[in-house]
Amino acid sequence: MRQNAGMLELAILGFLYDAPLHGYELRKRITALAGHVRPVAESTLYPAIKRLEKAELLARTTEPGAVAAPRHVLTLTEEGRHELRRRLTEPPQRNITDENRWFTVLAFLRHLDDPTAQAAVLQRRLAFLEEPASFFYDGDRPLHAEELDDPFRRGILTIARATTRAELTWLRATLDSLDS
Amino acid sequence: MRQNAGMLELAILGFLYDAPLHGYELRKRITALAGHVRPVAESTLYPAIKRLEKAELLARTTEPGAVAAPRHVLTLTEEGRHELRRRLTEPPQRNITDENRWFTVLAFLRHLDDPTAQAAVLQRRLAFLEEPASFFYDGDRPLHAEELDDPFRRGILTIARATTRAELTWLRATLDSLDS
DNA sequence: TGGCTATACATCGGTTGCGAGGTATCTTCC
DNA sequence: GGAAGATACCTCGCAACCGATGTATAGCCA
């Protein structure tokens, strides 16, 4: 199984974990989840479904369409359910560091029923956020917003810092409550 | 010219706008800018450089390496300089809505010397952020963090809201100061 | 009747992205 | 002298992504 699978596959597996859906409905859910930030083209979704079907992570049954054309109802196989849990338990580093991907992980993390496993994933994000990092450097020294003349670059740092702060607060609180 | 060019090309054009650089140095700068979130593989960078060279947006001259192998110093052509300004003036919607891409736009927005053009780009981001949007819906109604049982999904909304708030504050302040 | 919108799925061709691997030079340290 | 690590560039093959386009059904409105 590829290590660096896209977040689209993760979202498909995640939504189908709850209930079987047909592709069109799946697309609406994915669009609601991430569409305003990063839309999903149909020409990306349907091939992704085919990939997962070919890998036997999901199965397809045809039903007469409720409104129009016939639907292909997609159901996760036992292997597919296991694969989602695996991808959530051991996300590739990119799914930890890239906020878009990380949000997709978070959206389905509840499907891991072991709070320890959930906490381990949050810990990886925590470790990433606690690493000192900037977007701009003077040699090796990370620059602070106040040191920049460029108002736009200052904006990047200001926004990133607010995000990091809010997320650290939430992460620590959530880790605490998972602990108990 | 493609409308939906990647942010990698934008970063290359942006860094070279300031000064000619060789590929290896370019890679370090891009890694500093976005690498902790989304690393750049060399196998992505070098082909991207070739694409831009082929499109005559940059030119290459070979210099003996300062430390090791010979360097290919990359310089933007006049067309390349124009193309960067064009991409910054009229970014595709995806570069407005996707935070990773948006940050790349912001990182080089100072290269537009017309404050009105800069403000127009910020306005598009402002309009996007002011649209009511959630990640989760009950029918058409966007759900608030407090309405969710899932602590992880609640986290998504909490973090996103903090980011949006910080960015709105910064956007409005910056638009004000561009106005004067 | 004709046009619009929504439902529902799909392919084609082209671009982008990336892991794995390769080549070569120079410095540093053991 | 030899290995390690940084500098510096590159290709191959595959996977992912996406815009354009196509096919069909059904409801609604003018």
Image (cartoon, coloured by chain):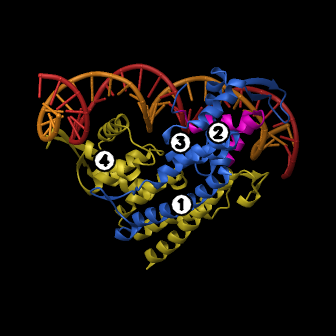
Chain colours: A yellow, B blue, C red, D orange
Does any portion of residue B24 appear in the rendered image? Answer: no
Q: Pick the residue in front: B93 or B16.
A: B93
SS for tag 3?
helix
Q: Which residue is mark 4?
A: A28
Residue farthest toward the bottom in the current orientation of the protein: A180
Lower position in the chain sequence, tag 2 or tag 1: 2
Residue at x 64% of width, y 20% of height: B54
Instruction: Give the magenta range.
Output: B5-32
Q: Amino acid at mark 1?
A: Thr
- Closer mark to the observer between disc 3 and disc 2: 3
**Gap in Å between the C-alphas at discs 4 and 1?**
25 Å
Q: Which residue is mark 1?
A: B163
Q: Is residue B48 above or below residue A57?
A: above
Q: Is residue A31 above or below residue A164?
A: above
Q: Which residue is mark 3?
A: B95
Q: For the residues tagged 3 and 1, is the chain the same?
A: yes
Q: Amino acid at mark 4?
A: Lys
Q: Is residue B85 left or right of residue D13?
A: right
Q: Is residue A169 left or right of residue B69?
A: left
SS for tag 4?
helix
Question: Which quarter of the rendering shows the N terminus of chain B?
Answer: top right
Q: Which residue is mark 2?
A: B11
Using a 10 Å C-alpha cutoff, classify the residue at mark 1 as few (fewer than 14 neighbours), some (14 to 19) or many (20 or more). many
